[in-house]
Each structure stands twice: as structure tokens, then as C-alpha cells.
Amino acid sequence: MKTFIEHINYGLFEGKYVPLEMPMLVDEKDVELNKPKRGGPKKFYVFVKNDKGNTVKVTFGDVKGGADGKTLSVKLQDPAARRSYAARHNCDTAKDKTSARYWSCRLPDYAKDLGLAPVDKGDGGGIYW
């Protein structure tokens, strides 16, 4: 039986306890808050502070990454799709930064940072999308 400290510093690999080379928890000082990025188990992720002051990782977007499962496409250029998305997700009421809905509704604001084509919001595509 391993002690608690040994469980933190060591991990089970192929039936043997081996020392961990990287810390398992994300250090709050090393992450950039409120800046969505590509990657993770879904299309995008962002680190935010919750009401308790803890840093949490919020993942959002399709798990598959697109219709073909290979791309990370987002339909920002289609005004009808943007209107439908904003209505379906009630983007006008999304206020909680720790929710995926909040970040998904504000994705066009970060399109340039994420390598997506910029959006012209003046074409009637919805408030957020």
C-alpha cells in the first residue's frame, strides 16, 4: 500500500509504480485566463476563474470536431446558421463564464485568435453569432 504522497508523485504503469515526470494538476499561474484555444477533448477550451476563485477548464464544441471527424470547422460565415445557433442556445442570456454555452456563443469574438475566418456581424446573423 502506497502513502498519499507516493500516489501523487508516482503513477501505475504496466503494473509498476513509476515516478511522474510532469505534475498532474494545472498550475494556475501558468495558464492564460479567458482566452479560448483549440484542442482538448472537444474543439476548444478556455481557463476561467469560478466564483470560489479556483481556475477551471471549460471545454466546448463538438467532440468529433466536424462532420468528417477530422476538421475543426465552425459555420461562422453562414448567416442563417448563426441565427439558428444563437436562437437555439439562447445566447442573449448566457452570462456564466464557467459554462460552455457562454464561450460557444462568443466564439466569433475570438475567431481571429483561433484561426477562424472573421465574421461580419452586420449581416443579420444574430447578436452573438
Image (cartoon, helix red, strand yellow):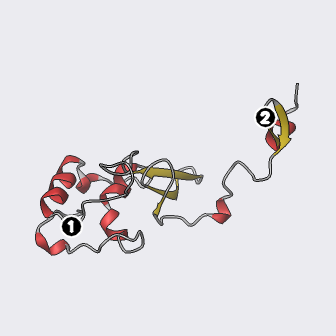
User: How many numbered circles does the render carry?
Assistant: 2
**Mark 1 neighbour class, 10 Å CA radius: few under 14, some 14 to 19, many 20 or more:** some
Q: Is residue 42 left or right of residue 27?
A: left
Disc 1: which residue? 77
Front-most of residues 90 and 63:
63
Disc 2: which residue? 12
Residue 64 spot, x, y in % from top left? 39, 46
Instruction: Residue at 12% x, 59% y: name it.
Output: 80
Q: Which mark is residue 4?
A: none
Residue projecting furthest to the top: 1
**Mark 2 neighbour class, 10 Å CA radius: few under 14, some 14 to 19, many 20 or more:** few
Instruction: Residue at 21% x, 53% y: name it.
Output: 85
Instruction: Residue at 44% x, 49% y: name it.
Output: 42
Q: Is residue 15 left or right of residue 116?
A: right
Q: Amino acid at mark 1?
A: Gln
Instruction: Residue at 11% x, 67% y: name it.
Output: 124
Query: Dividing the image into 4 quarters, which one contains the N terminus?
Result: top right
Q: Amino acid at mark 2?
A: Leu
5 is higher (above) or lower (below) than 73:
above
Q: Is residue 113 left or right of residue 50?
A: left
Residue 127 spot, x, y in % from top left? 20, 64
Give yes or no for contact between labels 1 and 2 (Cβ–Cβ under 8 Å): no
Q: Is residue 126 left or right of residue 55?
A: left
Upstream in the sequence, badge 1 or badge 2? 2
Which quarter of the figure has residue 117?
bottom left
